[in-house]
Image (cartoon, rainbow, N blue to C red):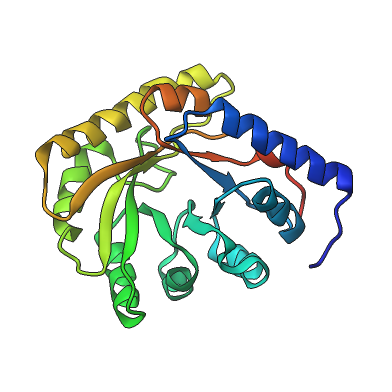
Amino acid sequence: MSEIIEQAEIDLIKTSVNEIVNSIPPDVMLVAASKTRTAEEVQAAIDAGIKIIGYNYVQEAEKIFQIIGNQVQWHLIGHLQKNKVKKAVKIFNMIETIDSVELAEKVDKECRLNNKIMPVLIEINSGEESNKTGVFPEDVDRLIFQIKDLPNIRIKGLMTMGPRFGDPENSRPYFKTTKKVFDRFKDQNIPNVEMRYLSMGMSNSYPIAIKEGANIVRIGTKLFGTRCKI
């Protein structure tokens, strides 16, 4: 491991994990958003009970994965570049950010080569922000029906980031928008499409996301403390 963290930092992470786990319903999955965190920090979170590690970037996850390994599940929670698909398929147990036919097809192809079935979530650009990844809510149907029969991926739900706000209450309409799409597909019983997971909410907004139906929350700063620089 590259750096040694103080026992006080480990204790703080442990306390934060316990507080968050005790504050969320038992059926809500907690993803530790570990962008820029050291392997020691990640291991401390795992030792405290974290079962899912989330990374935004494949190359960063790869470095930590070489140290941590398969102690936990790994979720990709950032945009997946097409040239990183091969590595991503080998590391992650779920890709939360599928937003195009081309990306889904590449993931499917690599999974086929690795004899793997990949659970995926469709990333919704709920704020319809032109500078953000994700599919707009009105385009979700087309994407899902174009990729639902790919043999080596399984559509398991939706994910959204939503616009960033200082006041987390302002995120509520975007969570509601995504939940409406989620419920609409859940009611359709489409073959190969299981609306099981709704991933919404981060450190400042996860309580509201849970109230609006999220059963996966992605928490970083509130778990690890202020992000370190790399």
Residue 112 or residue 181, whichever sits in front: 112
Q: Classify residue 51 as left or right of residue 140.
A: right
Q: Residue at x 24, y 28 (%)?
A: 180
On the image, the x and y values in percent for residue 136 come to: 28, 40
Query: In this view of the protein, can residue 26 be seen by the observer?
Result: yes
When asked about the image quadrant of residue 3, the answer is bottom right
Q: Report the residue at 40% width, 57% height from top.
A: 95
* Residue drawn at 45 percent across, 38 percent down: 161
In the displayed structure, 136 sits above or below 212; it is below
Quadrant position of the N terminus in the picture: bottom right
**Horizontal side of residue 145 vs 54, given as left or right:** left
Quarter of the view holding residue 178: top left
Viewer-proximal residue, 115 or 125? 115
- Expressed as whole percent of the image width and height from the top left, the position of residue 155 reads 26, 53
Location of residue 168 in the rendering, given as x and y in whole percent from the top left corner: 53, 21
Location of residue 79 with respect to 107 vertically, above or below: above
Q: Nearer the viewer, residue 88 or 230?
A: 88
Q: In percent of the image, x 29 and y 43: which residue is there?
A: 196
Residue occupying the far bottom of the picture: 113
Among the 4 quarters of the image, the one containing residue 132? top left
* 198 in relation to 192, above or below: above
Task: Give the vertical position of 31 relative to 70 (above or below).
Answer: above
Locate residue 64, reporting x and y percent. 65, 65
On screen, residue 36 versus residue 158, left or right, reads right
Asked whether the viewer can see residue 124, the reply is no
Quadrant (top left/top right/bottom left/bottom right) for the C terminus: bottom right
Q: How many marks?
A: 0
